Amino acid sequence: MVYLDHNATTPLDERVLEAMLPFLKSFYGNPSALYRIGRLSRSAIETAREQVAALVGVSPSQVLFTSGGTESNNLALNSIMSHSRLLISSIEHPSITEPIERFQNRSCSVDVLAVDKNGIFERESFDRCCANRPNFASLILANNETGVIQSIAEWAGVLREQGTIVHTDAVQAAGKMPLAFDSLNVQLMSISGHKIYGPKGSGALIIEKGTEPEPLQLGGGQEQGFRAGTENVAAIVGFGKAAELALSEMPQWRNQMLDLRQLLEQRLAELNATIFSQAVERLPNTVQFGIDGVDGEMLLMQLDKKGFAVSSGSACASGGGMPSPVLMAMGVTRDLAKSALRVSLGKANTEADITDFVKCLKTILNRT
């Protein structure tokens, strides 16, 4: 199989697995225990905290470990219980939009920031939203579908000046682009382990000093009292190792991805494919495209039968038959949006993978 869906998840790096194994087999002590194997587990967690902190340029005390990006987003949003006016963008991940719908049903007012045809936040829409003086804002840093990168520091800076608490979903950005939390002007940021060759079930909420999110669960007081429950030591250790590797290998990875992305986009041009957001800055590994007259879901299944794993950009809601809200927010026509596929490249991919993928596309579409 040629795996081309790394924005969905990444394979576990062998070096990460090696770091995790002792904590799956021998060092099983509860990190809250005072005896030796408990202290070893606690020490491993704190080492991982330092590794994750280094990836995003913060002190270890600003890292709260969670089970992943979804929990981190929900933990951040749980802080808005006391806020009456909220701001999100029209291209947020469902782990933001669905909790927001629940808050909206509790008489919270929600403003939605529009995007332009390239998926960039619109200045006019932003100004209108700011005029309503939101208490809390959540704005995605890099979109999971298109890969578009937003100038979060600029938008968040304006919001902070008027007293808004700002959160950013950086799950797709972390490990794929240089990331310095303090320079983003946000108080809260979500990241995840399994997007950077770490284990599923690992993530973190990065918090500005002095910011205190409202806990989702209470109990033993772990993670400074913000996330009760015995820690998943092996997953946290794996996340830390993955963060360390991502930081050290990022320059090489980015160059490799950019070369492969350029090759892919050149080959897709031979199919007259529409590459969404091609004109703006995107994650180096992400290409979302559509082909007129093609059903994206059917094409995905045909590619799967040929040994290629990609994702559909249509992201149809269960039973709804609706195309991707992200593409619709960008003004893409319904038919073109429903033809969309996303290719997200990873470090094991090669030029041969790209050549074979496009050749397979041509065969399926009878364009050889």
Image: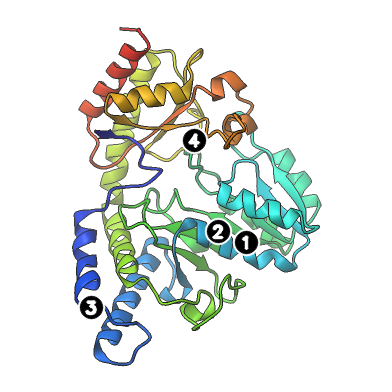
Q: Residue at x 80, y 51 (%)?
A: 131
Q: Are marks 3 and 4 in contact (CB under 8 Å)?
A: no
Q: Quadrant of residue 25?
A: bottom left
Q: Position of residue 57 (x, y in %)?
A: 42, 65
**What numbered label is drawn on residue 146?**
4
Badge 4 amino acid: Thr
Q: Residue at x 70, y 62 (%)?
A: 164
- What is the crowding at mark 3: few (fewer than 14 residues within 10 Å), some, or many (at least 20)? some
* Disc nearest the viewer among 1 and 4: 1
- What is the crowding at mark 2: few (fewer than 14 residues within 10 Å), some, or many (at least 20)? many
Q: Residue at x 26, y 28 (%)?
A: 307
Q: Earlier in the sequence, mark 2 or mark 4?
A: 2
Badge 3 amino acid: Phe
Q: Are marks 1 and 2 in contact (CB under 8 Å)?
A: yes
| Residue position marked by numbered label 2 in the rendering | 73
**What numbered label is drawn on residue 27?**
3
Q: Earlier in the sequence, mark 3 or mark 1?
A: 3
Q: Position of residue 27 (x, y in %)?
A: 23, 78
Provide the secondary structure element on which disc 3 rests: loop
**Does residue 113 lie above or below 341 as drawn?**
below
| Quarter in which the N terminus is drawn | top left
- Would residue 342 be found to the left or right of residue 261 on screen? right
- Would residue 246 be found to the left or right of residue 212 on screen? left
Q: CA distance from mark 2 to mark 3?
A: 30 Å
| Residue position marked by numbered label 1 in the rendering | 77
Provide the secondary structure element on which disc 2 rests: helix
